[in-house]
Image: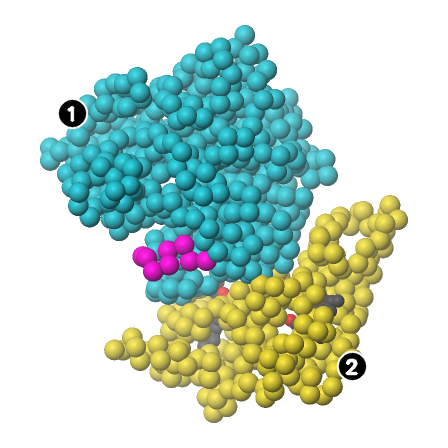
Amino acid sequence: MRFLLALLPAILWGQLPSDPAAIAKGEVLYRNTCAGCHGPNLRGGEGPNLFHSRMVVGGPPRNFFSLLSKGRPNTEMIPFRLPEEQLWQIVAYVYSHTRPGLGPPVPGDVAAGEHVFEQAGCRGCHMVSGKGGVLGPDLSSLGLRMPAEKIRESIVNPSAEIAEGYSAVRITLRTGQSMGGTLRNHDNFSYQVLRQDGEYALIDHAEASKIERLSHSLMPATTGLSPEQLQNLVAFLHRQRAPILKFPVTFFNY
Amino acid sequence: MLFLALTLTLSAQTIDPRYANPNDWLTYDRDNTGRRFSPLAQITRANVAQMKAEWVFQITRLPTRSEATPLVRDGIMYFTVGGEEAYALDARTGRVLWNYLHKPAVSTESGDPSQPPRQGANWNRGMAISGTRVFMATSDCRLLGIDARNGSLVWQSNVREGLPCFGTTGAPLILGSRVLLGERGGDTGQLRGHLDAYEVETGKLSWRWFTIPAPGEPHADSWPATDVWKVGGAATWTSGTHDPDLNLVYWPTGNPGPKDFDGSDRKGDNLFSNSVVALRPASGERVWHYQFTPHDVWDWDSNETPVLIDALWQGTPRKLLVQANRNGYLYVVDRTSGRFLRATPFAKATWAKEFTSEGRAIPRATAIPNAKGARVCPDVHGGTNWQPPAYNPQTGLMYLTARDSCGIYFPTGPTIDLETQQPQQYFRAVELATGKVRWEYAFEGVQEVNHAGAMTTAGGLVFFSSREGQFLAADAGTGKVLWHFNTGGAIRAGPMTYSVRGKQYVAIMSKAAVFTFALP
């Protein structure tokens, strides 16, 4: 029975982050309990950056809750003996930043929005539910990852903010050959570029004569949609809430 | 002379043209033959001593253990971490291209808040690859089709739909437009084993072959007329091999149940437990079977690799299937017909009195578990186990991690017999032509079970590991150790090799990391 009660908020977790009262309480608790280690902006301090925690960004809420109540043995991440309700409020507050999507579903004709998605060629570069191109990010979980206004902006002004791991590069090799794509990973020694054709170019620094990091998105700005079509498209994308199973490659392993 | 004769038959080996590119490693065992023999020969007996670590990839979410063999295609490495995570790396640098974290559908409290909830076994032997897709099995019995370019989930199928799940741990195997996968859980007393084929494109189940016949089906009379066949085990938890010319896929099966060591409620041979079966890839129709341990009461799963070797057999070229079985014998079978040709011990084995000319093992009466305890070799871990062996056509030697150890078997379960013989583990090279151990390397240190596999190359080398994480390279002909590297964690996986832009690499998973090596 206790178990069931404990699970109840987890079942309702979809509503947690949009409950402003719980989030406000959670914010106060976070500031007093967590901010000293994880930073007031959640971006880390003595403790890790919560935006780069796969548990926080993608895992089931119950795992996060259970970490707070049980802690992680032999680390500074001790168990927090707060009432369960307050722990859930902290989860809600953290999620309101790391999973800013959710919120009430955007009004609009979802089926018509899906039609726009196909007609406007979005699927050529984006996967939804396992189908589509690979140049841009998979959008199957977009509704969890992004609030509606940001989805809208990504469509009309793709270069305003570039998705992590998807910045555009143009590389010229010493052989004279040149290629473009998204920079999926890189360090001081090598580049991993996903080319427009879906193949990887795996290049050493020494092989490149010129590396141009482009500030614009490889996604063309979408024009020519009526306000209604755009609204429907956003409504469709906002409902894509598959569990987050993929993370920027910079997460966690480094 | 023998050496030459075997070398001559090298070109005749049936290799699926899919696996013709020498630079790649595309199945758990590299190609369709299960030999774990790579034609790469940049790293040789002469220069392997100079081999250095090239890069290491550390896994943060500690899996129960790493049993996977990475795949490499066109310079990209793919591997699994436990039954829940998939990675693609730049195989020259170890830099991540993508990762995918599976969310088990069934939640059980794991107790460790940093681990996602899961069900079933959380170890995994790796992926299969076809076109723009990779495939992996999961701890919650799903088969996943993942886009090889960006790591997005394309489809998932439930291998145990409506049935209890004990995890799926084998690396799937591609056969044309289908991907084959078995299950695990043969020791639970709740499983009737099966091998499944799914459509590569859609994940739809194409066929399912049950390892235990239902009443009325051929060989159902190898079980009593009770319901025990429904939970008779014979699981399919490793990968098979296939012969494109004969159009047969070979799959090995596990031990019978529901009780592993007490066969009183399952009198009979318990087919097709502890067997290798030859099936038609398109339909799953069974063409032949050979049973290694009829009516097993020692938990000697026969899930070891069915290695396909084309060689001269007593002067005649023959298509062979060779398996180093957990029961301590190396079996040679004609893979066209399933006819038994020979069984010779490669580890200490006392359970069999003799083999009939049809290849039926006759166990000693004293070997059957009883209340006083039957002293039998090998012990329950076997003379070898699922860890993949290797075969090098240039030496005619089969390489395997072997264990000389005996057990005391009670109907309720076994223990290790430390009085008769202290367990001692070896890496052994067995001559195919004679069944004799040509050379061996005795592992010092702990004799906890060594589940590390083997790999051999045209550079005249064989690679293997100690339980404690020493990764070694030896002269494939003589067994002389030429190089070793302490990975610092238990190795429970098989090594592999690949080449990118003219440079040969050797890779192995150890504990929670992937290590790669190359010449400086």
Front residue of B328 and A92? B328
Indicate the colour of chain B: cyan
Q: Which residue sits at x=86%, y=47%?
A: A174
What span is in magenta?
Answer: B157-164
Most distant residue in the bottom direction: A21
Image coordinates for residue A175, horizontal then vertical, percent? 87, 45
Q: Describe the element under mark 1 as helix, strand or loop.
A: helix
Residue denoted by label 2? A224
| Mark 2 Cα shell of 10 Å, populated few (<14), some (14-19), many (≥20) | few
Q: Is residue B129 above or below residue B359?
A: below
Q: Which residue sits at x=43%, y=32%?
A: B306
Front residue of B219 and B143? B219
Front residue of B324 and B378? B324
Q: Which residue sits at x=45%, y=43%?
A: B283
| Mark 1 Cα shell of 10 Å, populated few (<14), some (14-19), many (≥20) | few
Image coordinates for residue B112, horizontal then vertical, percent? 38, 62
Q: Is residue A80 left or right of residue B351?
A: right
Residue denoted by label 1? B365
Amino acid on which the number 2 mark rests in the picture: Gly
Was residue B378 drawn as part of the magenta stretch in this picture?
Answer: no
Q: Describe the element under mark 2 as helix, strand or loop.
A: loop
Q: Main secondary structure of the magenta part?
A: loop
Chain drawn in yellow: A
